Image: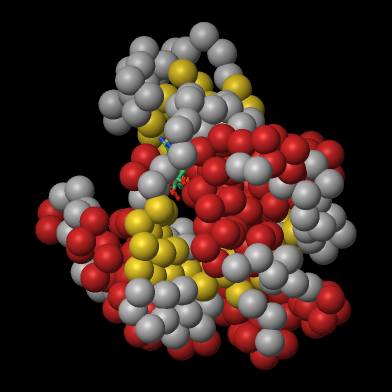
Amino acid sequence: MVLGAVNVDMVVRAPRLPAPGETVVGPGMERFGGGKGANAAVAAARAGGRVRYIGAVGDDDIGRQALRELQDDGVDTSGVLVSTASPTGVALIVVGPGGENQIAVGAGANGDVSAELVTAELARVLPGAGGVLVSTEIPEEAVAAAVRAAHGAGVRCILNPAPVVPVVAELLGLGPVLTPNAGECLALAGRPPADGAEPKRDQVLDAAHALVAVTGAEVVVTLGADGVLVVRPGGTSEHVPPRPATVRDTTGAGDTFSGVLALALARGVGLDDAVRIANAAAALSVAGEGARGGMPTADELVAAEP
Ligand code: ATP
């Protein structure tokens, strides 16, 4: 089970990012499937999982296309709400010449994912689920309902706190496996780096230990091109180096990581091997365009990480 947002990403590559009030013109527009929940669902399905995604789209053309794309990747979308109240979520992205970007998200129907919807869906399907992956671009009460339902049913919950929202702090005691990136790890532990400085690995490690002390479960921190940090209950930790990658577009690397990690854990793979597989999948994902372009199939993953 994967819960979180689904968006349509619309990307314009421009000669520079626009200043306030300015219009910049690029040669065209590219459209990619996005939203951390939907991306992770695709990553897990492409890697061979049987995946059910819960979220919401609007009753509009881009929403129907978003659902078709999920279905084409084998994701079960029968639990997705088609909202008549809101349009499908969109991310409007301008990319400058050096790859820097400016993003505005219209959350749209993602804001209509209610605690009631989540609770009803999970009550029906949780008994047969190997794991639940939750990301936080949906209303906080829906996030809380999902983590609480998984905990109540004794099903392993992976919580990707992206972005960090206040309700996450309330859910840590329920023992989800956390998959923050470095900045999210520091923010969750209440130790953001001074004036936006680049986080140091030691600081992140300390913060992850502090989180493990609260959750009593593994904290798996993604470090981008620096690989992964794993901290386990009991206090042991390990730095897993990155896999070699051809970097084209790193959008969605974290979603690929959490989706494939959740799938491996749901299948009963031990944490160390699950992290190794997810690290390999995420390294492959950065070679493709958009969040989903490089996400590997099960065969591609086996070839890269036998
Ligand atoms: P996003 O928000 O774009 O999904 P994120 O900040 O959540 O990203 P990152 O920590 O940037 O996630 O990356 C997730 C994982 O992807 C890393 O832990 C690593 O396994 C893999 N990865 C990312 N960049 C690279 C790279 N340049 N080379 C190899 N692996 C990479």
Q: What residue is at 65 percent from the left and 65 percent from the top?
A: 269
Above or below for 193 versus 139:
above
Q: Position of residue 272 (x, y in %)?
A: 52, 63
The quadrant in which residue 97 appears is: top left
The quadrant in which residue 77 appears is: bottom right
State the quadrant of the N terminus: bottom right
Decide if residue 62 is on the left or right side of residue 217: right
Residue extending farthest to the left is 194
Q: What residue is at 37 percent from the left and 40 percent from the top?
A: 225
Asked if residue 114 can be seen in this view, the reply is no
Q: What residue is at 55 percent from the left and 67 percent from the top?
A: 271
Above or below for 121 versus 182:
below
State the quadrant of the C terminus: top right
Decide if residue 172 is on the left or right side of residue 67: left
Q: Position of residue 23 (x, y in %)?
A: 39, 19
Decide if residue 44 is on the left or right side of residue 20: right
Front residue of this view, candidates 147 and 96: 147
Which image quarter has ligand 1? top left
Asked if residue 284 can be seen in this view, the reply is yes
Above or below for 283 versus 59:
above
Decide if residue 183 is on the left or right side of residue 122: left
How is this picture coloured? Answer: secondary structure
Residue extending farthest to the top is 27
Q: Position of residue 125 (x, y in %)?
A: 83, 75
The count of marks equals: 0
Q: What residue is at 26 percent from the left and 62 percent from the top?
A: 204
Q: Position of residue 254 (x, y in %)?
A: 50, 49
